[in-house]
Amino acid sequence: MTGPAPKPWIMGIAPYIPGRSTTDDGRQVAKLSSNENPLGTSDAARAAFAAAAGRLERYPDASATELRDALAAKHGLDPARIIYGNGSDEVLHLAAGAFAGPGDEVIYVRYGFAVYEIATRRVGATPVIAPDRDYATDVDAILAAVTDRTRIVFVANPNNPTGTYESRAEIARLHAGLRGDILLVLDHAYAEYIEGDAKDDGGMALAKSAPNVLVTRTFSKMYGLAAERIGWGYAHPAIIEAMHRIRLPFSITIAGTAAAIAALGDTDFVAHARQHNATWRAWFADEIGKLGNAGLRAIPSQANFVLVVFEGALTAETAYKGLMDAGYIVRWLPGQGLPHGLRITVGTEEETRGVIAALRALTSA
């Protein structure tokens, strides 16, 4: 007697591998593998979370009215056009579930976020990988990959795991080059970390005006609420209505929602976290540049991490193990086609200086 057989496209999925929290021997060390906020969470968000603990017996508001209203007020949006989910990951899955299926194609860039492939294969669609441009999104490569079967294009901006960023002009050019029946999903999980003249890629403006653009955001990074998994998205009403049809009714919690609303209002915490990241990301990249003669290179980043590629005698795998021995867990990425790369979260000052010291020691060993 045989059991049920899963669909073949399900068995083609490589499970998502999260960043590690402990070493091989179980030691708790500095975790720089998951792009968490090194400054923790806003005190206001913590207080709101604790205050909600007395309502554990209640289901959350399935319409998330308070959260949608807070987001709309913060960003100048129509609350009816906001969708929410268990992290932005769920929103990405909802997009694939509503707009792609067997026989369809979904495009994302090489070295793109691992969830894009999982979401694509989960619905039986075919993933199409567009070549990168020195680890960055290549708009021309994406447009060249479009066929009459293309239904969705996923673009993270800034991109994970490379940290690269495409300008407003490039995102506009990408959108202009796509058919109207192709959904352009702009993943803005790291948008709060963008510095300099690049501040806005125009994605939200496109989502407000175009019928085929979805922007996704998260509270897991800048707001330090990774444990509560609060994500959201914004798009044309027809896109949101379709996604709501397959959304789980209670996918975000009462306490997490309360924390997220409070976090939105704590502008001082966000400003401090942004400045900390900008300062130590730049310092870290400069220090990696000093190790260039040892074959290390920092890919320019607009996120809260830096991708370091190893092009010399010291390999990424050796560095990964050496950093772990020194007390730092980072993200080695062979499963994403980057066996020569380590994605390293910008941590506290002490952690960031420690990683550089450890890498310096490894390159001179």
Image (cartoon, rainbow, N blue to C red):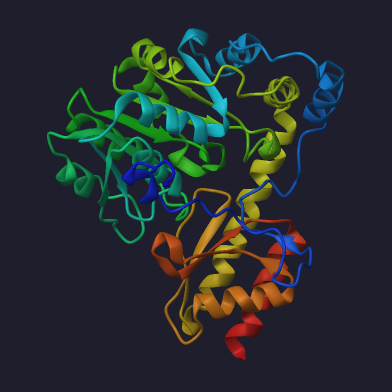
Q: Residue at x 44, y 62 (%)?
A: 335
Tell me: 345 left or right of 150.
Answer: right
The quadrant holding residue 240 is top left
Q: Residue furthest bottom?
A: 365
Which x, y percent locates residue 254? Answer: 73, 19
Which x, y percent locates residue 258? Answer: 74, 20
Quarter of the image where the C terminus is located: bottom right
Which x, y percent locates residue 294? Answer: 50, 84
Nearer to us in this view, 307 or 201 = 307
Q: Residue at x 52, y 38 (%)?
A: 189
Q: Residue at x 62, y 84 (%)?
A: 362
Rendered position, 271 above or below 286? above
Tell me: 352 left or right of 68.
Answer: right
The quadrant holding residue 178 is top left
Q: Residue furthest left?
A: 148
Question: Can residue 167 be seen from the camera position used here?
Answer: no
Question: Can residue 211 be seen from the camera position used here?
Answer: yes
Nearer to us in this view, 248 or 324 = 248
